[in-house]
């Protein structure tokens, strides 16, 4: 089936954001004087759970932290996540999170060739908006036909909800689209919506189980729209 639209994941795909997310979580923990600190190896494990709030809870559960018995636990997690989001946005605005090499070129080629593009992510809406504005300009948000994010659907990846939400908005069959993902959770989500998926790994996701992906690559640098069409043709 002809490829008619591309659907980009955000974290780990448009940009290597996870180090900035990790540091923003730590900034929030420090500001709240909690004494928690997430190193790279621990964060790699915590990425098994998508969504920042769920990730904080998962951390407390795996470490059996006494905070679990706090009556205000939900509020604590909500406040920590709001603070983390502010720290993360500041890092974006300071230019600390560029797009992955090759991504801007791919997006511009898609625009030139009138191939519609969308986003399917589980991150917080303001994170997506700011990443795009800072790196591609204020107008770039209009380049995307649909922006599905963690605020739009009840269940985050690996559930397929955000991909199904995008499909409904762009009014295409799943086989007419191609998802660009970096993680196992992303592959499971896209395949759950019957969308063919190409994986480009990063340091946090390399080595994960990408069963169901059309191809697994390591970089977008030099990758063309023709390459994506060739990969999609294998579906
Ligand atoms: C990324 C995520 C997000 C971010 C943190 O998934 O799981 O939770 O790590 O962002 P995807 P929030 O690659 O599918 O976008 O703290 O805003 O959830
Ligand atoms: Mg991702």
Image: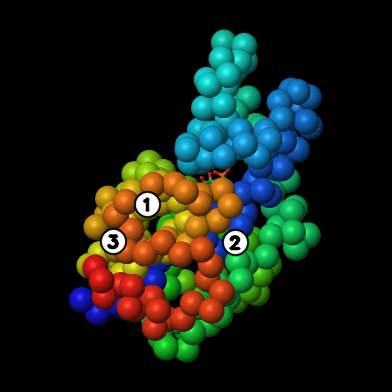
Q: From mark 3 to mark 1, how far is it between C-alphas?
A: 14 Å
Instruction: Write the residue at 57% across / 39% down.
Output: 44
Q: Is residue 125 visible?
A: no
In the rendered structure, the answer to whether residue 27 lies left or right of residue 202 reads right
Colour basis: rainbow
List the residue tagged with mark 3: 195
Which numbered dot is residue 210? 1
Foreground tag (1 vs 2): 1
Please state the horizontal and vertical placement of residue 194, each as a whole percent of the image. Answer: 24, 57
Which numbered dot is residue 11? none
Image height check: is 232 above or below 183?
below
Image height check: is 113 above or below 18?
below
Please state the horizontal and vertical placement of residue 39, each as a whole percent of the image. Answer: 68, 35
Image height check: is 212 above or below 232?
above
Depth order, front residue of 165/193: 193
Which numbered dot is residue 15? 2
Tell whether label 1 touches label 3 (CB within 8 Å).
no
Q: Residue furthest bottom?
A: 112
In the rendered structure, the answer to whether residue 68 lies left or right of residue 162 reads right
- Circle 1 Cα neighbour tier, 10 Å, few/some/many (<14 / 14–19 / ≥20): many
- Circle 2 Cα neighbour tier, 10 Å, few/some/many (<14 / 14–19 / ≥20): some
Q: Quadrant of residue 73?
A: top right
Instruction: Write the residue at 33% across / 78% down.
Output: 230
Q: From mark 3 to mark 2, how far is it between C-alphas?
A: 22 Å
């Amino acid at each position: 089936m002809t490829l008619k639209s591309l659907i980009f994941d955000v974290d780990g795909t448009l940009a290597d954001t996870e180090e900035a997310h990790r540091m923003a979580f730590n900034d929030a923990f420090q500001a709240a004087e909690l004494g928690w600190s997430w190193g790279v190896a621990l964060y790699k494990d915590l990425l098994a759970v998508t969504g920042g709030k769920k990730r904080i809870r998962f951390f407390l559960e795996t470490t059996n932290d006494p905070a679990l018995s706090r009556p205000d636990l939900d509020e604590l997690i909500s406040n920590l996540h709001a603070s983390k989001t502010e720290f993360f946005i500041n890092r974006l605005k300071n230019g600390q999170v560029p797009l992955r090499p090759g991504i801007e070129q791919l997006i511009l080629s898609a625009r030139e060739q009138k191939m519609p593009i969308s986003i399917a992510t589980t991150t917080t809406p303001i994170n997506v908006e700011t990443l795009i504005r800072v790196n591609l300009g204020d107008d770039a948000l209009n380049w995307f036909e649909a922006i599905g994010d963690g605020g739009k659907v009840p269940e985050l990846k690996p559930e397929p909800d955000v991909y199904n939400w995008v499909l409904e908005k762009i009014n295409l069959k799943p086989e007419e689209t191609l998802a660009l993902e970096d993680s196992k959770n992303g592959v499971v989500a896209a395949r759950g919506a019957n969308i063919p998926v190409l994986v480009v790994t990063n340091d946090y996701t390399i080595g994960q189980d990408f069963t169901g992906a059309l191809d697994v690559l390591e970089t977008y640098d030099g990758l063309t729209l023709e390459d994506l069409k060739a990969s999609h043709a294998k579906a």
